[in-house]
C-alpha cells in the first residue's frame, strides 16, 4: 500500500523504495528518475518482510496499512513535485526531476528538527503536518496486553504491530507555507492530532479533524476513559488561518472530504482492507462547508472510503444523495421500476476510486463500473490491479502501473500498461440485482454470450445461458439437445455496432420460451428484434430457414447471406405487434425442402409497446 501514482499534464509520477520517477503517460517511457536520500518509505510502505524477488511464488512483502493510514509522501503539481526526503520537503522540477528548492519545517524548542507528517497542496500553499503524534506513548499497552504481545509468534507480532500502529496517522501541528518560497504563513497546534485522512482543502479553505483515531478511542474506553469533550472539526481560511467555524459535537470520524461545487463537507471514517484497526464505516455527517451548519446525520454502513461524486456519495455497495443522505435509486432497465443503485465487486485488497465516468477497483482481476452507461461490473482480464489502488483515469487513458511485484496472486501479465476507451471492443459485465418478476418492459437475450452488456439504446442484454456471473436472469426454456452453441470474437464481424450481439448464438432446430412475467397480466403488444449473422462461411442459399414467434410464421425462407449482403455481417429483423401476456415463444426451423439447412440465431430484443407507440394519446 504505497502511495498511488499521480498524473498531470501527460506525466505519470510514481515513487519507488528510494526514488521517484516520471513517465510519459501515453508511452510509458521514463522521462527522468531522481534518487531520494531518505524517503521515509521503510516501515511505512514496506518493511523487513520485503524481498526483492518478484518471481518468488510466495509473498515477499506482508500486507501493511501503508498509505491507507499514513497518506502520500509526495504531491504533484503542474510545475513542481513535492516529496518528503528525510525531515525536509524537496521540490522537484516536474520537467526534469531536478531539485529546485529544499523546504524545511520551522523548528521550536519541543522539536529541534520535526518530522514531516502530512503533505498537501492548495493553490499556491503547501500544507504540512509537523511531527507525528506518538499515540503509542499517549496510550501505552496494559501489562496484560504487553504480555499477550510478548507471547505472540513473530508473524502475529508483526501484524499486531503494523495494524495497531497509529503513530504515523496524525500530525501534531499544521504549518501552512508559500509553496514556492517556503515562507511560513501560519501554524496551528493540535489538541490531540490532525488525522491525515481528515485534512481536506478546497478553494480558500482548509478543513481538519483534531481528535484521536477510532482505535485509540476504543483502547482508552477499555481502560474506562471516555472520549474527550473538546474534540473539534475546524474550518480555516487557508491564507491566514482565521477560524471560519468550528464544530465540537458529534465528532466521530477519521475522514473528511469537501464538495466545492455544492459547498458541502462530509465527515466519515476510512474503512478498507489492510487498514489500521477499528476503522468501521457506520455513520456519515454532512455540513454546510461555508458556515458549519448541520445538513444531515445518518447511520450508513460502508466498507470503503466514501467517494464524493457530483451530488452523490458512492460507497462500496450503494450511493446516497449528498444533500439528504437518502439512498439513491435507479430505473430497472428490465421493468422500469425503481430499485436501489448498487454495483458489485469480488475480492480485492484495494479500495474503490472514481473518475467522472468510471469506478475502478480490484475485483479479482482489474475491475470497473461504467457510471455513464450503468451497465454493470466488468473486468480487464489477464492482469490485476495492485493492493494500492492504481487504476486511475487521467489525461485520456486508464493508467495501470504495476503494483504487484510483491504479490503471489497468479495473473498472466505482471506489467504496467495504459488503456484507452474503445467501445467497439468486446467487454462483458455482471449485474448484482435480481429480476422482481414484474412484467418486462425491455430486455435483450444474448445467446451464448460470455456476460451481460448494455446497448446504446439502454437495453440490458443478458447472457443466456448465464455464465458471466451475477445477473437478473429470466426463466428461459430451450431444447438443448437439438442445438449447438457457437461464439466468435465480434472483431470478425461487421455491422452497425451490434457485432457483439451477433457474434455468438445457437445453431440447430431452436425452440425456446422466454418468460416476461412471473404472473400472467393483461395482454400487451411487443416489438421483437431478431439478430443474426452467418459465421460459418455459408454461401447464398446454403442456409435457409423459417422463424416463428408465438406460433406464427414471421420470416419465411430467411437467407442471412442474401439479406445481409455477406457472411460475417449482422442482420436484424424486426417483428412488430407481437401479443403476449407472460411468455413469448420463438422457433427457428429449416424451410420446407431444406432439411439439411440448419437455422441459426444470435439474439432477441423484446420491447413492450406503450400507448403512444400504438397510436394512442
Image (cartoon, grey):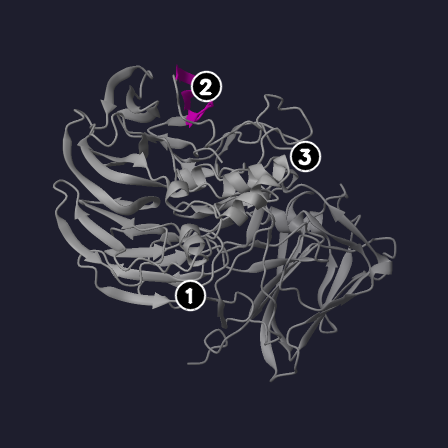
> Could you tell me if residue 124 is visible in this image?
no
Of labels 2 and 1, earlier in sequence is 2
Callout 3: helix, strand or loop? loop
Q: Which mark is residue 410?
A: 3
Characterize the local packing of mark 1: few (<14), some (14-19) or many (20 or more) Cα atoms within 10 angstroms.
Answer: some
Residue 94's x, y, as percent?
31, 21
Provide the secondary structure element on which disc 2 rests.
loop
Q: Vertical placement of 434 versus 532: above or below?
A: below
Is 497 situated above or below 126?
below
Sequence-wise, the earlier of marks 3 and 2 is 2
Name the one closer to the observer, 581 or 255: 255
Name the mark nearer the viewer: 3 or 2: 3
Q: Magenta segment: does it hold 34?
A: yes
Distance from disc 2 to disc 1, alpha carbons, whole Å, reads 43 Å
Residue 247: x percent and y percent? 23, 59
Q: Quadrant of residue 202?
A: top left
Cα separation between marks 3 and 2: 26 Å
Residue 190 in sight: yes
Q: Which residue is mark 2?
A: 29
Q: Which residues are magenta?
A: 14-35
Residue that protrudes farthest toward the front in the picture: 143
- Judged by its main secondary structure, the magenta piece is strand
> For the point 40% across and 47% down, which residue is it?
139
Amino acid at each position: 500500500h504505497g502511495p498511488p501514482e499521480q498524473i498531470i499534464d501527460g506525466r505519470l509520477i510514481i515513487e519507488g523504495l528510494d526514488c521517484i520517477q516520471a513517465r510519459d503517460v501515453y508511452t510509458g517511457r521514463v522521462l527522468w528518475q531522481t534518487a531520494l536520500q531518505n524517503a521515509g518509505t521503510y516501515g511505512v510502505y514496506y518493511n523487513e518482510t520485503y524481498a526483492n524477488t518478484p518471481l518468488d511464488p510466495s509473498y515477499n512483502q506482508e500486507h501493511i496499512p501503508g498509505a491507507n493510514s499514513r497518506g502520500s509522501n509526495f504531491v504533484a503539481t503542474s510545475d513542481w513535485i513535492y516529496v518528503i526526503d528525510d525531515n525536509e520537503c524537496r521540490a522537484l522540477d516536474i520537467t526534469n526531476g531536478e531539485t529546485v528548492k529544499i523546504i524545511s519545517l520551522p523548528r521550536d524548542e519541543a522539536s529541534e528538527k520535526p518530522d514531516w507528517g502530512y503533505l498537501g497542496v492548495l493553490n499556491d500553499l503547501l500544507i504540512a503536518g509537523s511531527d507525528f503524534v506518538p499515540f503509542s506513548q499517549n496510550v501505552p499497552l496494559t501489562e496484560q496486553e504487553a504480555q499477550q504481545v510478548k507471547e505472540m509468534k513473530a508473524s502475529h507480532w508483526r501484524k499486531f504491530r503494523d495494524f495497531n500502529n497509529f503513530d504515523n496517522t496524525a500530525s501534531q501541528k499544521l504549518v501552512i507555507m508559500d509553496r514556492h518560497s517556503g515562507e511560513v504563513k501560519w501554524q496551528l497546534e493540535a489538541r490531540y492530532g490532525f488525522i491525515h485522512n481528515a485534512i481536506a482543502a478546497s478553494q480558500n479553505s482548509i478543513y481538519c479533524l483534531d481528535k484521536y483515531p477510532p482505535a485509540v478511542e476504543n483502547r482508552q474506553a477499555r481502560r474506562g476513559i471516555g472520549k474527550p469533550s473538546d474534540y473539534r472539526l475546524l474550518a480555516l481560511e487557508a491564507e491566514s488561518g482565521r477560524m471560519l467555524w468550528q464544530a465540537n459535537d458529534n465528532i466521530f470520524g477519521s475522514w473528511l472530504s469537501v464538495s466545492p461545487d455544492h459547498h458541502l463537507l462530509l465527515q466519515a471514517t476510512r474503512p478498507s482492507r489492510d487498514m489500521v484497526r477499528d476503522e468501521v464505516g457506520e455513520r456519515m455527517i454532512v455540513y454546510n462547508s461555508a458556515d458549519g451548519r448541520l445538513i444531515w446525520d445518518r447511520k450508513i454502513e460502508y466498507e470503503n472510503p466514501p467517494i464524493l461524486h457530483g451530488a452523490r456519495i458512492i460507497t462500496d455497495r450503494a450511493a446516497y444523495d449528498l444533500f439528504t443522505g437518502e439512498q439513491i435509486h435507479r430505473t430497472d432497465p428490465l421493468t422500469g421500476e425503481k430499485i436501489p443503485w448498487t454495483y458489485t465487486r469480488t475480492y480485492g485488497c484495494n479500495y474503490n476510486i472514481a473518475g467522472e465516468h468510471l469506478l475502478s477497483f480490484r475485483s479479482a482481476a482489474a475491475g470497473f463500473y461504467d457510471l455513464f452507461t450503468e451497465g454493470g461490473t466488468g473486468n480487464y482480464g489477464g492482469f490485476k490491479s495492485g493492493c494500492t489502488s492504481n487504476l486511475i483515469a487521467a489525461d485520456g487513458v486508464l493508467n495501470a502501473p504495476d503494483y504487484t511485484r510483491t504479490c503471489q496472486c497468479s495473473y498472466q501479465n505482471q506489467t504496467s500498461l495504459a488503456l484507452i476507451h474503445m467501445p467497439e471492443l468486446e467487454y462483458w459485465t455482471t449485474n448484482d440485482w435480481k429480476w422482481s418478476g414484474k412484467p418486462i418492459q425491455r430486455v435483450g437475450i444474448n445467446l451464448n454470450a460470455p456476460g451481460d452488456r448494455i446497448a446504446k439504446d439502454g437495453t440490458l442484454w443478458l447472457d443466456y445461458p448465464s455464465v458471466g456471473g451475477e445477473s437478473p436472469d429470466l426463466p428461459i426454456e430451450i431444447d438443448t439437445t437439438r442445438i449447438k452453441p457457437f461464439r466468435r470474437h465480434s472483431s470478425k464481424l461487421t455491422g452497425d455496432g451490434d457485432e457483439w450481439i451477433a457474434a455468438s448464438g445457437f445453431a440447430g432446430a431452436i425452440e425456446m420460451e422466454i418468460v416476461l412475467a412471473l404472473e400472467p397480466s393483461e395482454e400487451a403488444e411487443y416489438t421483437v428484434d431478431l439478430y443474426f449473422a452467418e459465421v460459418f462461411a455459408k454461401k447464398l442459399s446454403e442456409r435457409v430457414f423459417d422463424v416463428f414467434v408465438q406460433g406464427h410464421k414471421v420470416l419465411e425462407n430467411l437467407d442471412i447471406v442474401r439479406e445481409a449482403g455477406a457472411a460475417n455481417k449482422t442482420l436484424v429483423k424486426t417483428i412488430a405487434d407481437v401479443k403476449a401476456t407472460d411468455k413469448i415463444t420463438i422457433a427457428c426451423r429449416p424451410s420446407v425442402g431444406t432439411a439439411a439447412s440448419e437455422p441459426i440465431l444470435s439474439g432477441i430484443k423484446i420491447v413492450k409497446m406503450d400507448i403512444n407507440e400504438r397510436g394512442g394519446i
